[in-house]
Amino acid sequence: MITIPIDDSFLPDTRTPDGLASEKRHALSSPRTPKSPEALRKAEEHGALLASFHIDAIQARAARENQRAAEAVQRRLRAADLARQRLQNRFNAVAEREAFLTEEKKQEAEKKASLRLQRADEARQARGAFEKARADKLASAAERVEDSSRRAAFFVQATAAKNAHIVKHALAVVAAHKEQRRLLVRNPKTPLPTHKLRTSPTCLSRPRFT
């Protein structure tokens, strides 16, 4: 077993509850001595100073509370301004987007309208060119038909003239032979003509159309 020596001189003095009660009773039972005017003046000054400090503390606390309230109001106002600015920016962005989309749609509609007009103009020009080509073709065909009709009429007329000439020549030959026979019957000693009737090469040749 180990024994540790304790020196009471290093321990603090501890008062017991009984000692405290006896000290209190002694202080209350002892007569009070009146304070001097100097002590009263000092006590009054000290009280006034404490009251001034208390009022200053109250005023400072009130000022801090007012400042915090004002700062809170300012924070709320700034937050409201910021929210309103954000909302206004959002509205502006939506309005700008709507304006951009409207302008884009307008430009697209104008582009489509211009393209439709261009295509209609091209179709009209193509139709006009087709109609002109068709009219030229019909005119050329009509001219060829008229030329063919004129050639056919000329050939028919030339053929009729040629046939009429051949018939006339044949009739002349027959009439000549009849005249020779008649002369031979009247006068058998009459010499017969040795020449023959010839057809004109110009009349018997194939007609040419000019």
Image (cartoon, helix red, strand yellow):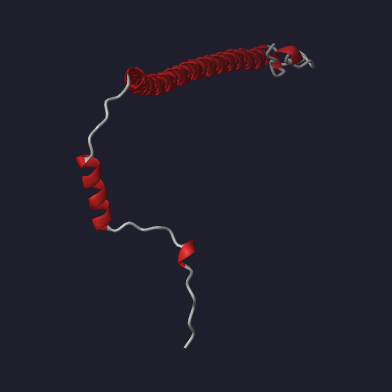
Asked where in the image residue 129 lies, by quadrant, the reply is top right
Which residue corresponds to the image point at 40% horizontal and 19% vertical from the top-left? 85
**Which residue occupies the foreground of this view, 79 or 109?**
79
Q: State the image coordinates of residue 130 (x, y, percent, origin top left).
A: 53, 19
Query: Residue 189: in sight, yes or no?
Result: no
Residue drawn at x 36%, y 58% is 14
In this rendered view, identify the residue nearer to me: 149 or 183. 149
Q: Name the side, left or right, on which 112 lies relative to 56.
A: right
Q: Residue 100: where, in percent of width, then height?
A: 46, 20
User: Looking at the image, which is closer to me, 190 or 162?
Assistant: 162
Residue at the spot 22% in from the left edge and 35% down from the top edge: 31
Quadrant location of the C terminus?
A: top right
Can you give x and y, in whole percent of width and height, for residue 12 in the image? 43, 58
> Which quarter of the picture shows residue 194?
top right
Where 117 falls versus 29 (above or below)? above
How far from the left and from the top, in percent, is residue 119?
50, 20
Q: Where is residue 187, by image quadrant?
A: top right
Which residue is situated farthest in the bottom direction here? 1
**Would you say 44 lies left or right of 117 here?**
left
